[in-house]
Amino acid sequence: MNRKLFVLTLFGSVMLYASSAFASYIDQLTNQSAEWMGNPTRTAATDSVDGVIYNPAGLSTVADGLYTHFTSQSIDNNNTTTVMDSNYPGNKKYETHKPSKFVPSAFFNFKQDNWAVFGGFSIFGGGGSTLWENGTPNLNVAVQTAETLGEAGGQGWANGANYFATDGSTNGNVSVKMLSMLPALTLGGSVAINEIVSVSLGGRIVDSSQNIELKATESGVGGTRDKIYEAQWTALGYHGIIGVNVRPVKELNLAATYESHTKLEYEVDVKKDNSMPTAMFGNKQALQALSGYEDGRKFRFDLPAKLQVGAEYAFTETFKASISLLYYFTQWGTYEKPTAATAITGARNVNKYDLNPAYEAGIGFDWEFLKSIHWTAGVNYDCMNMRSEDINEVLNKIDLWNVGTGLKVRTSGNLNLMVSYMHNFYVDAQNSNQTKTVNNQGTPTPADDVVTYYKTKYEKYANSVAISIEYKFL
């Protein structure tokens, strides 16, 4: 298999790394409040304004007044990619550790008589900021290939630099910095039909943006650090939300919330590409042709529809337990990412993903062990349900356990304060199909174009601390 043709599929692999942190399914995030971090089973809760996200129908069951809520999270994400073969011609281990220090959310609920109006702002999806200081296995190969293609045309890069040594290794001191954010605005209303049943109707606007910046250091002594590629792709989408809350007896509360699927059509804006045009792709610049993320390109990657159900039972006046289930319906969405252009013609191509449905399930409790002081805790299993052959740099999404605990203090009848902590235990994963990576043998010649297969292991863990303040006016 020709080396140059093979690596064309590799560069796009890094484009999903930015959304890998704390995600419930691909891009969505469940961690929207300090209350959820302290007990990740909030889908039937009615004790906080974070019900805007978890149980909007329950917001018309609280006492009259204007409620406001603010949460701030600090998340420490750690990701490791390890090539499980000593013969790989480059670094075997790649790590990223870049905390997201401030992840805010804010909600309000105005309740009067049997109705309520609610809204809020939160980071509905994405993975925050990520920095891979030594690149990633496939990314480094792709950038090296861009240099090789440019050299074949007379010059590796527009600035005349060379970033890779002539020993054939993929260590080019390449780094990639990414920012993935899906801020969202939620608005809606809830009505209590009677003392047992309440319903809600609302909607959410999602503004998605993904940013990537590649840098590389020139080979040799005194080489400069150069930005070689920078791009952003953005999309705006929306979905509807319906909910129902049922309290058949005082001790038991049941709730269900459904969110429709969100169509997201992204448009790519390439701000800088220092690679050279190459005749192999109809004179397209090498990095854009290798990745498929060309200036002005459009593609679809939706957010799936989601059903949230939950139950909360008060065993005593001071102790209650809860369970929750979230289910993601992927069958109604379109999931595609740009991939390498076709050689010679330069035609645009996409990778289409047939994603499996996924789910979350959890159990937790709330115990008022001292007057006005609550201890909460819970565990939630997040099943990505990714096919093992799809777990790679392109879709590095693996199952995890969310374990959280927190303290809530009711300092007065109107003010609640909370601090919580959560640890994420990701299940280590290896791709069942071996990762394809090129075995470089110095300067490529037809005899050297050998494809070798290497297994790759993906490891993650995360820690998060959150605080919230909630106040009731009127």
Image: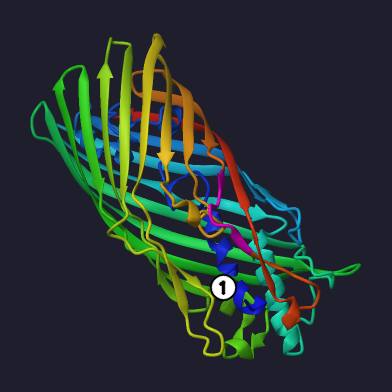
Residue at horizontal 76 percent and vertical 89 percent from the top: 154
Q: Dot 1: few (<14), some (14–19), or many (≥20) neighbours within 10 Å?
A: many
Amino acid type, mark 1: Ser
Residue farthest to the right, as pictured:
221
**Residue 262: x, y in percent?**
31, 58
**Magenta-drawn segment:** 429-436
Residue, far front: 447
Residue farthest to the left, as pictured: 194
Note whether residue 32 is visible: no
Q: Is residue 428 left or right of residue 97?
A: left
Q: Is residue 293 left or right of residue 415?
A: right
Position in image of residue 23 (x %, y %): 46, 46
Q: In this view, does 356 lie to the left or right of 148?
A: left
Residue 259 position within the rendered picture, expressed as x and y whole percent measured from the top left: 26, 49
Which secondary structure lies at badge 1? helix
Residue ID for mark 1: 291
Residue 199 visible in rendering: yes
Please, is residue 267 above or below residue 445 in the view? above
Q: Which residue is drawn at 78% across and 72% down?
A: 441
Q: Residue at x 32, y 19 (%)?
A: 321
The quarter of the picture where residue 168 lies is bottom right
Front-lying residue, 207 or 405? 405
Any magenta on residue 247? no
Screen quadrant of the C terminus: top left
Please say if 350 is above or below 96: below
Tell me how the rendering is colored: rainbow
Give the image location of residue 174, x and y in percent: 72, 63
Say whether residue 432 is magenta.
yes
Quadrant of the image for the N terminus? bottom right
